Each structure stands twice: as C-alpha cells, then as structure tokens.
Amino acid sequence: MKITEANWEKKVPTIKVGEKMVLDESGKYIVKPDEIKPYMFWMEGQLHLSAEEGDGLADYWKMFIHPDLEEWAHARGYYWEWQNAGSLVLGKL
C-alpha cells in the first residue's frame, strides 16, 4: 500500500499505550484503551515520525520504536529509519 503526500494523514495509526478509567454516559466508571496518535508530518517527499513529542513512541537514545509502529510500517512494505535524534523517516522495503 503506497503512502503518499495525498493520503498519509488517513493512514496514521492509533497506538494503544495502556488503559484508563472514564465515566460513561450513565455516570459509571468503565475501562477504555488509552490511545494516542503519533505526531507525523510530510516533508521533502517523505513521511516523518517525531520522536520529540514526549509520547514515548520513539526514543533515539534507547533505540526504541513502539512495536505497533514497526508492525504498521512492515505491514505496508515500509520500515522506520532514524533521520536524526528527533525524527524518523518512513522508507520503502
């Protein structure tokens, strides 16, 4: 599945990072997934993932990329490559 400047925003995954307690409409507490969208942006013809947002999805110094982001990229024929300590670039396998 090709990721392009025109379609990338629709393809950004939501990453489950835990669970949280929330009030439902009736006032009861329920457990829901705690999910976040990674901060991604298109620049110079490539999709970038920010590692500077403090969301814990990528950390250059620990050489960590959230497994769900790795899986998302590989399922589409891509991989993540560090551009610098603050950003990763999506590359084609």
Image: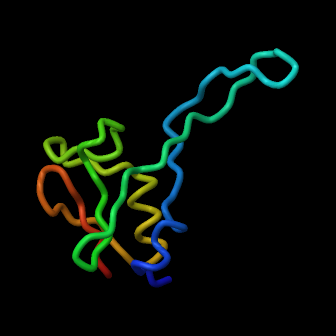
Left or right: 3 in relation to 10: left
Depicted 64 relative to depicted 73: above or below? above
Q: Residue at 29% across / 47% down in the picture?
A: 58
Q: Is residue 2 visible?
A: yes
Depicted 81 relative to depicted 92: above or below? above
Count the marks.
Answer: 0
Q: Quadrant of residue 57?
A: top left
| The C terminus: image quadrant | bottom left
Seen from this angle, which residue lies furthest right?
26
At which x and y percent is residue 89? 25, 67
Q: Is residue 93 visible?
A: no
Q: Quadrant of residue 54?
A: top left
Depicted 26 relative to depicted 42: above or below? above
Q: Residue at 75% across / 22% down in the picture?
A: 30
Q: Residue at 28% across / 52% down in the picture?
A: 50
At which x and y percent is residue 51? 25, 48
Left or right: 52 in relation to 75: left
Q: Nearer the viewer, residue 18 or 47?
A: 47
At which x and y percent is residue 76? 47, 76
Q: Residue at 17% across / 47% down in the picture?
A: 60
At which x and y percent is residue 77? 41, 79
Q: Nearer the viewer, residue 41 or 72?
A: 41
